[in-house]
Image (spheres, helix red, strand yellow):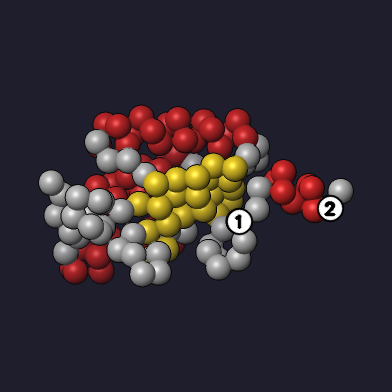
Amino acid sequence: MADLLPTEDRKTQLPPLAETGWAAVPRKDAIRKILKFKNFSEAWGFMSRAALAAEKLNHHPEWKNVYNVVDVTLTTHDCKGLSQLDIDLAKAMDKMAPDAEVQRNHGEPVMSLCEIRARTA
């Protein structure tokens, strides 16, 4: 069972992740990142690579994929909050998607290219 991430580790490890687009989830001890890729194939490739990393860590993300968008939330369910596993998986995911666009404002709607095209057609 994983332990909750200590306060000192949160102070040192979360700010660098925030710089790459990870943000706290309101009312949940978790971090979230919304990545936008050029197309579905790139999004799926990222998810495949991330799934292999998650499997190695035995720690799996909560995520959603719509066409070119991957919306990821990381938290550790057995300790009911952030653990070192979340930090490690976030860092690994960041290395897998250096060119993805990041939607930093999580308050605005998440729209895939399909949805954007449908609105302008």
Residue designated by label 1? 110
Residue 8 sits above or below residue 82 on the image = below
Give the mark nearer the N terminus: 1 vs 2.
Answer: 1
Q: Quadrant of residue 82?
A: bottom left
User: Which residue is at a point 42% across and 57% down the rendered structure image?
Assistant: 32
Residues at marks 1 and 2, CA–CA distance in whole angstroms: 16 Å
Using the image as rendered, state which of residue 20 and residue 34 is in the foreground: 34
Q: Quick one: SS at disc 1?
A: loop
Structural crowding at the residue carrying mark 1, measured as other residues with C-alpha within 10 Å and reported as few (<14), some (14–19) or many (≥20)? some
- Indicate the position of residue 74 as horizontal and vertical percent values: 35, 52
- Residue 100 visible, this angle: no
> From where the camera sits, is residue 97 visible?
yes
Residue in the picture at 50% in, 49% down: 71
- Percent coordinates x, y for residue 8 in the rendering: 18, 68
Circle 2 residue: 120
Q: Residues within 10 Å of mark 2 (few under 14, many from 20)?
A: few
